[in-house]
Image (cartoon, rainbow, N blue to C red):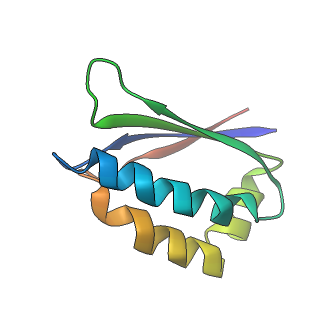
Amino acid sequence: MILEMAELCIRAGQAQAFEEQFRKAGPLIASIKGYCSHELKIGIEKKDRYLLLVHWETLEDHEIGFRQSDQYQEWKRLLHHFYEPFPEVLHYQ
């Protein structure tokens, strides 16, 4: 199993809108082959910071299966405009 991790820094004043859009985006990622689970953790000290954790069966399920899918295009449309700066995504075993 692979753990994808990304710290998401949300533009000032956009946290609530981001959370609303993230609820819409969750089913998109969950529909991908190899998806196991995901969590979105909200920062305590900085309320505009989130930690996204996604468990995948394989790295390819994320890097190819999700990122080359139509669902990813919709994920991008819903969420990417909230990030400042754009997050670094890391994977762990």
Q: Is residue 32 visible?
A: yes
Asked whether 46 or 21 is in front, the reply is 21
Please report the residue visible at 61 percent of the width from the left and 69 percent of the height from the top. Answer: 67
Q: Quadrant of the C terminus?
A: top right
Q: Vertically, is 34 above or below 2?
A: below
State the image coordinates of residue 4 (x, y, percent, origin top left): 62, 42
State the image coordinates of residue 32 (x, y, percent, origin top left): 76, 65
Q: Vertically, is 40 above or below 85?
A: above
Please report the residue visible at 30 percent of the width from the left and 65 percent of the height from the top. Answer: 81
State the image coordinates of residue 36 (x, y, percent, origin top left): 80, 46
Number of disc labels = 0
Q: Residue furthest left?
A: 12
Please report the residue visible at 32 percent of the width from the left and 34 percent of the height from the top. Answer: 49
Q: Quadrant of the N terminus?
A: top right
Q: Is residue 57 left or right of residue 12?
A: right
Please report the residue visible at 65 percent of the width from the left and 66 percent of the height from the top. Answer: 28
Q: Is residue 55 visible?
A: no
Q: Is residue 51 left or right of residue 34?
A: left
Image quadrant assignment for residue 86: bottom left
Q: Residue furthest bottom?
A: 70
Image quadrant assignment for residue 70: bottom right
Asked whether 15 or 90 is in front, the reply is 15
State the image coordinates of residue 13 (x, y, percent, origin top left): 17, 47
Asked whether 63 or 32 is in front, the reply is 32
Q: Vertically, is 50 above or below 33?
A: above
